[in-house]
Structures are given as C-alpha cells and as structure tokens.
Amino acid sequence: MKRSTRAPASRRARPAKSPARAAAAPAAHDALALLRDYRAREEHLVVGLMTGTSADAVDAALVRLRGLGPETKHTLVAYRETPLETQLRREILEVAAAQTLAPERLMKLDAALGERYAAAVFELLAEAGSVPRAVAAIGSHGQTVRHLPRASGRPALTLQLGSAAILAERTGIAVVSNFRVRDAAAGGEGAPLVPLADWWLFGSAEESRVLLNLGGMANVTYLPRGGTLEQVVAFDTGPGNVVLDALVSLSSRSAARHDTGGERAARGTVSEPLLAELLSDPFFAQPPPRSTGRERFGEHYAVTLRETGHSMGLSDDDLLATAVELTAVAVASAIQRFLVPRAGVSAVYASGGGVANTTLMRAIGRRVAPARLARLDVLGVPPSAKEALAFAFLAHQTLSGLPGNVPAATGAGRPVVLGEITPGV
C-alpha cells in the first residue's frame, strides 16, 4: 500500500499563499550564482526524488537540511509515494528490456518522466503545505533504463531518464541530476550511491549494522561499529523485487503486479534443485564492489526461470517460493562471506518495497541469524523513504561542493562531486 508520511505541524514548512510556479523566488539563472547563493545559506529545503528498478512509483521526500557533510542535521518534513501510471510504467519496462531502440522513443520517455517528476513535486509540496519558492533544490535520481557494470576493462555504463530541464522549468526549482555517471567516469560502478547517506544517517558506536535495501535489486551497506567512511562497504547482492514481480505478471497475464504480502510464495514449496541451479550464477561469488540490474536479473531472467521450473513440474507458487529463497540466500551468503569477517554483523535493517513481503522478510530473517533483522523504521526512517531522503542529501552534497560517492563501495578511483546542475528560474 502506498503511504504518505508527514512531520508534525510544528516541523512542517510554512505554507505560502500560492503554489504556482510563478511564485518561485528570484534566483540565479546560472550555476555559479546558484552555488554561491546556496552556500551562503545555513538551512535548506531540498526535495529528493527516486524511482527504482521496479518502476512502480515516484518516491518524493521533502527534507530540511542544516550543516555540511557528516555534520548535516535533517528533518523529514514530508514523504509521498505516487504510483506510476500503467502506460508509463509499461513504457519504462519495454524500453529497459529493448535490445534496439529508436532515439525518439528514449527522448519521449525522458520528457514524460520529467513531467511526471514535476507533478510529483507539486503533489508533495501541496501535502506538506509548502510552495516551490521555499525549496532550494531537487535531487532527482531519475529512472534507470540501462546499467552495465564494469567488464573486461570496459568502464561501467549507466543511463537514467527524467528530463532535468523539464523538471526545473515546470517547478522553477534548481535540479541536481544524473548522479551516477561521474562515479563511473572515475572508474566506479556508478552504484551504489546511497552508502554515504547510510553512513551519515545510521552509523553506530554500539553495533555493526547492515542496511539492506529490498528494491528491484537487493543491495547492502555495511557500517562497522564506530567505523569511518573508508570502512564502509556496499554492493548489490542480486535480485530483489523485479524477479518476483515479473513472475507474478507472467502467471497472471499482467493482471497483477505484486505478490501482496508474499501470500502466493507462502503457499508454494521451495525447489532445492532449481535454487541450486540459480545460485550457480557466477555473480553470487563475485567479490565487491559489484552492481547489477534488469540486464541480468530482469524479465528475461524470470521468463527463463519460469520455463525451467515448469519443465521440472513446479507450480507458479513454487516458483515464487523459490525466487524468494534465492533473494534471501543471496543476501545472507553475501553478508556471511564478505561482511561478517570484517567486524561481525549485529543487526540487519531492511528498507524498500520488499519489507512488505512477509514471506521474504521471514526467509531473510531465518538466513541472517544470529544477526537480528528489523525494519528500518526502528531507526526513525520510514523504509520506503530512505532512498528519496538519500538523494536529497546527495543533492545537498553536490551544491555544497562535496563528494557524494564512496570509492570503497563503487570502486571509483577517488571521491568525486556527483551530478549535473540545472538552475531554476
């Protein structure tokens, strides 16, 4: 279920008379003046936007930020999830899966996403009782339609759509976008980029933590007890919701998107032979830094999994049960192999859409024991809001002239300032 999270009234941005774009504050029309103005202020309202690999919704967070770098203090003023329209989501998935594509199709999707992001910003601000002129910047991750990790000396390639120009023009707010390519240019995977925010938000002097994101792909950030940023480790563990959602769509002939609560998986039986075959993929043994996406664990993977499973006499519910166990084993084995030997793991805190899948959470909890598994909200952040909050913080880093990547996580040669800046009006 899509949820909205609002701060208490005393912590919300003050409403203004009109939310119209014309009400945007007089601002610099060039990036240098924008940076000077931003850095001269002690406090900022920043919107973070995220659409993940599952391409099911725009996650939007309005965040009040004060300070710089790890000393930054934040307040989550409001959070909203806006489901993507069926036709737009279908186009995203078709473009992401296409082997060849007319440039015009990419251009149209880029523009359509820019318009959708702008609408999501207005919806978020209306719910928060705020207006565009109160917002200093938008950090927009964009929609990933292709991500190719480094291979055989070839640098990582990554493409996110969602026109920053349209978003800035419609809202009048400066936009920081296209975060991943600078890390890739510096020799990194371009992913994951959330680890800096994870360290900022969730580092602990009392326990070694794993921050687990169950999005379209599953990924982890490791925060050793009392550790420094240089000790942070993060990487993709493998498939998350994308394979599960694709299996549901295939079995229902697109009538359903999700296995709500993991109910169908709970009715199925895990096939150990099929699970062993799936786990033989060399990705699961690859040491970090590593990243993956739909190109490896997407719809084509789900089709092959389903065909193989049916040839073994398995039901669609059995396939869902096996795919759930695949995600759980991949997460747990990655933690055991690559993280536990460093400084132990006390707890795993889960976020992302997968936390709503009770069967998946139960399987992961069983596999990661004796470390305890909990939802991220026990640390004060709604599980669905973390990545949008992270991209608000990354935009703040960029506009402050500070690096946003963690080389130990992405494999980049050095810390770099991320993103491209599109001034507002």
Image (tube, rainbow, N blue to C red):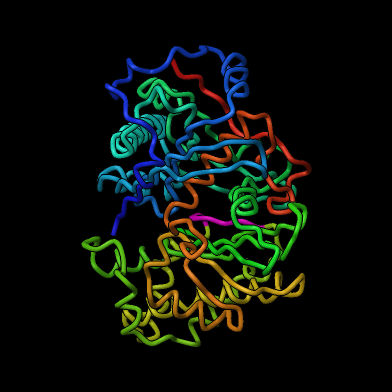
Q: Is residue 375 left or right of residue 112?
A: right
Q: Position of residue 257 (x, y in %)?
A: 29, 61
71 or 421: nearer the viewer = 71
Does residue 204 appear in this view? yes
Q: Is residue 293 left or right of residue 398?
A: left
- Magenta residues span 290-295
Compared to residue 225, the image places residue 177 above or below, namely: above
Locate the N terminus and report the quarter of the image it occupies.
Answer: bottom left
User: Farthest residue in the left direction?
Assistant: 255
Asked if residue 415 is among those painted magenta in the image, a careful observer would answer: no
Locate the C terminus and report the quarter of the image it occupies.
Answer: top left
Q: Position of residue 107 (x, y in %)?
A: 40, 29
Predominant SS of the magenta segment: loop
Q: Position of residue 209 (x, y in %)?
A: 63, 67
Compared to residue 423, the image places residue 391 above or below, namely: below
Q: Quadrant of residue 203?
A: bottom right
16 or 56: nearer the viewer = 16
Residue at (61, 56) in percent of width and height: 291
201 or 190: nearer the viewer = 201
Residue at (64, 72) in percent of width and height: 335
Asked if residue 293 is among those painted magenta in the image, a careful observer would answer: yes
Does residue 105 appear in this view? no
